[in-house]
Image: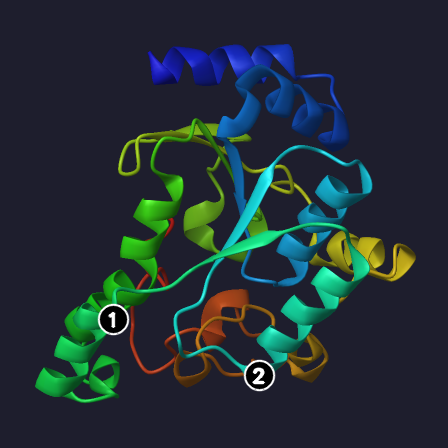
Amino acid sequence: MSIAITNTLLDNTANFSIEETLAFLANEFKDKVVFSTSFGQEDQVITALIAENNLPITIFTLDTGRLFQETYDVFHKTLKKYPIDIKTYFPDTTAVEVLLNKKGPNSFYESVENRKECCFIRKVAPLTKALKGNSIWITGLRAEQSENRNDLAFFEYDAHFDIIKFNPLLKWTLEEVQKYIDDHNVPQNALHKQGFVSIGCAPCTRAIAPGEDIRAGRWWWESSHKECGLHQK
């Protein structure tokens, strides 16, 4: 049924702008449309589109407890600029305590399994809570962010979270994202000007060199698909 709905949404919004599609979803699914922001460039564009068009879409973020100060800064600036609320979800305190007591604060450097365990506790579990009971999950994913995101569609059924994902910036280039931010004076994470293209937790993110893959700065010490479990692609 969800796949059928996904196909219907693709057909119904084929000729819509992003703003029109967001408004359509907000009207069709009422209070069951949510947008997850990590305050990166793409997410800031979508936040601006929601806020400037006064759309009734719930915006939430995941505070892992290991974020950069610059991420908190842009969070604060965003709330100051736009008349919006951003709901914050935190990891379970007991789960974090058990992880640190058992393996220490930097276990994620030791193996992919340990890193995924940390990501699950700090990101996936809170995200599961945030998405529960909702119908549409809006993301800032772009096809050019990584090879395994090239085959994404604008609307997809995410079986893991049992929800339909809408990726409005899927075909945008990084240059288009930056132009929108500049033209609309959208608050931006200061780390983007320092070579950080994809920004996650502070211990797990570094700047990238010219010519490096966009995701090269995430979990740079390991060879993997550079995903934390929030998105399967």
Circles 1 and 2: CB atoms closer than 8 Å: no
- Relative image position of residue 226 (x, y in whole percent): 37, 64
The residue indicated by pointer 1 is: 93
Question: Which sits in the foreground, 83 or 118?
Answer: 83
The residue indicated by pointer 2 is: 69
Residue 104 seen by the camera: yes
In the rendered view, how is the structure colored?
A: rainbow
Position of 44 relative to 129 (above/below): below
Q: Quadrant of the rendered structure where residue 74 is?
A: bottom right
Residue 112 seen by the camera: no
Labels 1 and 2: the sequence-earlier one = 2
- Relative image position of residue 48 (x, y in whole percent): 75, 49
- Relative image position of residue 5 (x, y in whole percent): 44, 13
Q: Amino acid at mark 1?
A: Thr
Q: Quadrant of the rendered structure where residue 75 is?
A: bottom right
From the image, which quarter does the N terminus lie in?
Answer: top left
Q: Nearer the viewer, mark 1 or mark 2?
A: 1
Q: CA distance from mark 1 to mark 2?
A: 21 Å
Position of 145 relative to 110 (above/below): above
Q: Element under label 1?
A: helix
Q: In the visual, does 52 lie left or right of 204?
A: right
- Relative image position of residue 17 (x, y in whole percent): 76, 27
Position of 46 relative to 181 (above/below): above
